[in-house]
Image (spheres, rainbow, N blue to C red):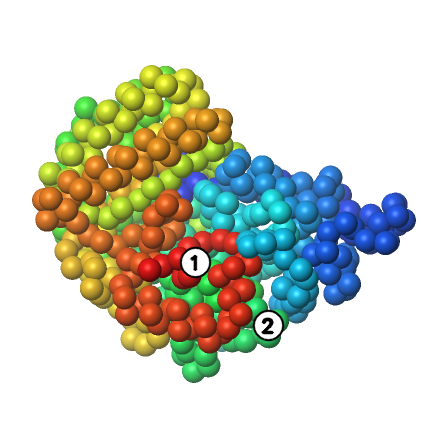
């Protein structure tokens, strides 16, 4: 049986672990085994990479490295995209050469270049079928500087390995909440951590980005150098360049570890759990070290259960935030004292399926939460009549999003572009829906039905003056527009920065992925 801790965290932030590479077959060895390819691979973009001196980093099907890259994506829908070739650079210089070569080669149309960090995206933002994928997973080192107390993190890193390294020095950082989640996507989308209440968003902890621009130049972006790019990258996604290093501040880890884990409850306790969610959200400004995501889970033929993850980052086992939970009978409890890294790696990976995600934010009001539960019940019943229950998992996840999250948690830092100072004016809740199915047809059906549910809930929140107009880029569906929710001023700023550092619009028309500024009205 999967532990409550595993359920509580894995169902919040799912990912796929990379498959082991059994052998390495590069373009160089491929040419040796098939001399006819010396005349060309048949793909101008792949030929350009070879001509740029990257033959040892370029892979084709059925190379083991090619297949390892493909099968390590979180979503099976993304795994089914098969690039012409995959280039796996190991240095910023190689990334620069790869990008320069691809930009100069004749494109096959729009979106012919993809960039992949941890591979955790639930939709095809980090892979491509008709083009080339730049896979950064070889650039996965974390180097801690004991003098500056900064961790230099590679763009292909995942949070489990990052914490494993910095915790050797008694340090921690404002990172993700599942070990298999990639660093790049989380930080560039803003990033929520169990430390966000006390230290801000993950992007706010970055002291410097090393970036390869569309013209191949390699620059640093920080408070003193390219400060506008520095700010834009903190929430602006993949609109400006390829980040090849994240320099992130660390802090002393809680001496005795944090205290956290999962509690599981029967669905009959949903109203009591919702009341507790409201309470924790409203009092979080007094206890910012506490976090309590709640997941309603319908999986297979079993009944819906509730997974409540409680975390106190100071290691307090008896925080008043969670006291009322003691009165509810649970069916599982895995809370204990452990390191942050141990907490986020305790959950198993749960990728390899077709997934549909949507997310909205609304005020911390019971009428919206009860409406959501009514919609959830109807949604589970509806999909369960069309999709075999054994092929269906539905997760509705609720996370406290108090208004103090909009306030800077440290002096300086250059700010971010999330725009929460104007949108997060009331204590709120982030809702993230995840539906997992097996077939293309089921995925299309789930997406259609879930989109309608989202529209229903948004209308209800608007009608009841309970809407929070911000959308979390790390969670939303491609049909949603998170960058627009940052506000007109931030959108204008982001477009100006993109035009300055990418005047040819390569990251708007050639490089797929994320949410493009060119599509924001």
Indicate the position of residue 236 as horizontal and vertical percent values: 40, 63
Q: Quadrant of residue 141?
A: bottom right
Q: Which residue is pictured at 16% across the width and 59% down the height?
A: 425
Whether pointer 2 and pointer 1 mark residues with C-beta atoms closer than 8 Å, the reply is no
In the rendered image, residue 377, in percent from the top left (x then y), is placed at 23, 25
Q: Residues within 10 Å of mark 2 (few under 14, many from 20)?
A: some
The residue lying at 77 percent from left, 63 percent from top is: 51
* 444 with respect to 399 (left or right): right
> Is residue 340 depicted above or below 329 in this figure?
below
Q: Earlier in the sequence, mark 2 or mark 1?
A: 2
Q: Is residue 344 left or right of residue 71?
A: left
Q: Seen in the image, is 91 located left or right of residue 76?
A: right
Per the model, the C-alpha gap separating discs 2 and 1 is 19 Å
Task: Check disc 2 and report its element: helix, strand or loop.
Answer: loop
Taking the spot 77% from the left edge, 49% from the top edge, the residue there is 42
**x then y, percent, for residue 416:** 34, 68
Question: Between residues 107 and 354, which one lies in front from this camera angle?
Answer: 107
Viewport quadrant of the N terminus: top left
Q: Which mark is residue 355?
A: none
Q: Which residue is mark 1?
A: 516
Q: Is residue 226 above or below residue 110?
A: below
Q: Quick check: 474 above or below 202?
A: above
* Place of residue 326 in the rendered image (x, y in percent of width and height, measured from the top left): 18, 35
Res 383 visible? yes
Element under label 1? Answer: loop
Residue 205 visible: no
Q: Is residue 475 above or below residue 199?
A: above
- Placement of the C terminus among the 4 image quadrants: bottom left
Residue at x-position 40% and y-position 43%: 13
Q: Mark 2 sits on what residue?
A: 215
Disc 1 crowd, CA 10 A, few/some/many (<14, 14-19, 20+): many
């Amino acid at each position: 049986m999967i532990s409550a801790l595993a359920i509580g965290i894995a169902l919040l932030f799912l990912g796929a672990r990379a498959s082991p590479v059994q052998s390495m077959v590069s373009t160089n060895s491929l040419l040796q085994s098939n001399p006819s390819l010396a005349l060309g691979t048949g793909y101008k973009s792949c030929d350009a990479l070879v001509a740029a001196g990257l033959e040892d980093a370029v892979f084709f099907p059925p190379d083991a490295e090619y297949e390892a890259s493909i099968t390590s994506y979180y979503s099976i829908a993304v795994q089914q995209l098969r690039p012409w070739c995959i280039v796996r650079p190991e240095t910023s210089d190689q990334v620069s050469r790869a990008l320069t070569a691809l930009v100069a080669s004749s494109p096959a149309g729009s979106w012919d270049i993809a960039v992949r960090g941890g591979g955790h995206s639930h939709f095809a933002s980090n892979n491509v079928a008709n083009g080339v994928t730049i896979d950064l997973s070889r650039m996965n080192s974390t180097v801690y500087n004991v003098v500056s107390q900064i961790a230099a993190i590679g763009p292909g890193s995942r949070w489990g390995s990052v914490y494993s390294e910095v915790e050797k020095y008694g340090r921690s950082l404002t990172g993700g909440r599942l070990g298999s989640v990639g660093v790049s996507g989380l930080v560039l989308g803003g990033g929520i951590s169990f430390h966000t209440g006390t230290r801000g968003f993950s992007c706010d902890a970055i002291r410097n980005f090393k970036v390869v621009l569309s013209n191949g130049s390699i620059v640093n972006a920080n408070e003193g150098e390219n400060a506008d790019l520095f700010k834009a990258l903190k929430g602006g996604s993949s609109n400006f360049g390829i980040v090849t290093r994240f320099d992130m501040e660390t802090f002393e880890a809680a001496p005795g570890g944090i205290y956290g884990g999962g509690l599981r409850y029967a669905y009959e306790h949903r109203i009591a759990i919702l009341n507790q969610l409201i309470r924790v959200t409203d009092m979080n400004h007094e206890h910012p070290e506490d976090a309590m995501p709640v997941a309603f889970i319908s999986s297979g033929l079993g009944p819906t259960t509730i997974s409540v993850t409680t975390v106190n980052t100071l290691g307090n086992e008896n925080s008043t935030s969670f006291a009322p939970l003691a009165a509810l009978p649970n069916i599982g409890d895995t809370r204990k004292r452990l390191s942050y890294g141990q907490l986020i790696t305790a959950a198993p990976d749960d990728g390899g399926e077709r997934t549909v995600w949507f997310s909205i934010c609304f005020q911390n009001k019971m009428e919206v939460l009860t409406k959501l539960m009514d919609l959830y019940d109807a949604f589970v019943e509806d999909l369960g009549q069309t999709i075999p229950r054994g092929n269906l998992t539905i997760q509705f996840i609720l996370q406290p999003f108090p208004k103090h999250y909009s306030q800077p948690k440290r002096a300086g830092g250059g700010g971010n572009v999330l725009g929460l100072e104007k949108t997060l004016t009331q204590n709120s809740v982030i809702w993230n829906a995840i539906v997992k199915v097996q077939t293309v047809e089921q995925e299309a059906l789930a997406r259609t039905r879930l989109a309608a549910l989202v529209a229903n809930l948004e209308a209800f929140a608007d009608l009841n003056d309970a809407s929070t107009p911000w959308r979390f880029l790390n969670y939303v569906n491609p049909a949603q527009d998170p960058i627009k929710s940052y506000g007109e001023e931030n959108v204008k700023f982001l477009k100006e920065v993109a035009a300055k550092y990418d005047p040819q619009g390569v990251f708007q028309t050639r490089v797929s992925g994320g949410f493009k500024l060119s599509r924001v009205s």
